[in-house]
Amino acid sequence: MGLYMNQHQNFLNSVIQRLGIGRSNKKTINPENLINLCNQLVSKNGEATLFSLAKIILEDFEALSEEQKKSFFTQLLKQFSVDRPSLKNALKKLNYDDEAQLRELHKIIEPKSQELLRRLNQAPNGMPSLLKMRESLLIYIKDSPELKPLDFDFIHLFKSWFNRGFLKLERIDWSTGAHVLEKIMEYEAVHDISDWQDLQNRVAAADRRLYAFFHPALPNEPLIFIEVALMNEVPESIMPILDTSVKAIDPYSANTAVFYSISNCQMALKGVSFGSFLIKQVVSEIQLEFNQIKQFVTLSPVPGLRKWVEEVNLSDNNELPENIISHIKSCDYNSSPDSLSLVRLTYYYLTQVKNKNGHALNSVAHFHLGNGASIVDIHPNANDNQNALVDSWGVMVNYLYDLDLVAKNHEDYANQKPVAVSSKLTKSVQIKKKKIIAY
């Protein structure tokens, strides 16, 4: 696939060069001139001209200063928005029973910026260039939220261009190209890969698997990857899994597949979800290779647990159950709560603390519960990494993917029914609920 993409790009470049189409090198690169080129791009239909203009626009954008890029986005939002006069006129004449008119309205209501992005994507290396462009936009949005409507265009198109039908699942092992292995080391976001020996343990050990999704336009760039440990039991700690000195087991003796790390690789694809597809396909791959494995669980972190506890502590919230308030008040910056306190706090945080949409406030819990998993166990002191201790006192959680219950759990969670939790865990925490806290 990579060879084909390179040949295709070289062909397009040679066509552009032979036609002599391009911007004069003497012309100043600035946001105003770039906007003019964008207007030309959306108004022309010649294929070679389109390729040339798109290539120049993407190259010139990269040459802009940070301040100029922000100015370009601001002008783009203003000049490439919805054609309001045409929309008002169409709404006046609209017959809601006329299917053709309704479809035409869909075209009119689309901002011109979306057609611009489509045409830019047709340039050689258009996709990776647009990903870089959105990365820049996301940075500016932090201080200039008025640019958010422009980001909606990127998300809308990326969800289409990166839908499951275009993605290819590949197993990453020690024979995978070094450039991809280096990317895995760079993008690991949950448990840092310290060196090549650490990486080899994760991809080459007999009882380990690593799978990644790729897109044909980005053949050497993983989009998301998942690391799997094949084990004889549900793990209570991440340390033995990450310990390179632990001897691998015979994978054909394993009965449990543990998903212990999922990393999104492309910041520019924020808001485009691959995780649920990845887990489901990896489950299928493992079942094909090891039909004796019937149990699929995660060993997941609890990001934000300590921050939530500290915020509640400062707020003097008295609507929580008494034992939860007691555990929270016992927490301080210098020592860890006892194990029972940690389990109870984590249980309450994951199952009762909701965002404004009624979903789990914790992002990892929301991801797994939304995919149909259930909370099966909570482990204090499961990660001795300093970042994990600071973030959540090292607590980790087992989410169970029971294939017979995934669909039901997903529907229940979507309908804001009680979170699926193992009865054993519920009995062990003994929390009397007063009120679900929404944030």
Image (cartoon, rainbow, N blue to C red):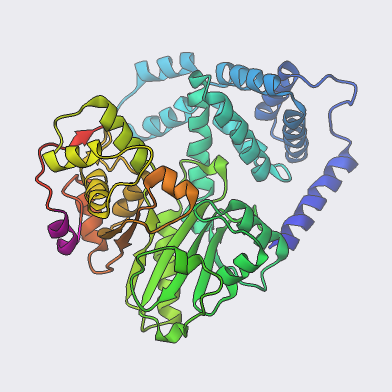
Q: Decide if residue 63 is on the left or right side of residue 100.
A: right
Q: Position of residue 399 (x, y in %)?
A: 31, 60
Residue plotted at (76% across, 34% down): 59
Residue 383 seen in the current view: yes
* Residue 78 covered by magenta stretch: no
- Which image quarter: residue 73? top right
* Residue 423 covered by magenta stretch: yes
Residue 392, above or below 398 = above
Q: Position of residue 43 (x, y in %)?
A: 67, 26
Q: Decide if residue 166 is on the left or right side of residue 281.
A: right
Pick the quarter of the image with the C terminus.
top left
Residue plotted at (34% across, 46% down): 336
Q: Decide if residue 350 is on the left or right side of residue 91.
A: left
Q: Position of residue 23 (x, y in %)?
A: 84, 28
Q: Where is residue 346 in the image (x, y as percent from the top left)?
A: 27, 48
Front one among 156 and 259: 259
Residue plotted at (41% across, 72% down): 284
- Which image quarter: residue 434? top left
Residue 76, above or below 366 = above
Pick the quarter of the image with the N terminus.
bottom right
Residue 321, above or below 147 = below
Report the label total. Answer: 0
Front one among 284 and 8: 284
Residue 358 seen in the current view: no
Front one among 368 and 201: 201
Q: Is the magenta stretch mostly helix, strand or loop?
A: helix
Residues drawn in magenta: 421-429
Residue plotted at (30% across, 37% down): 309
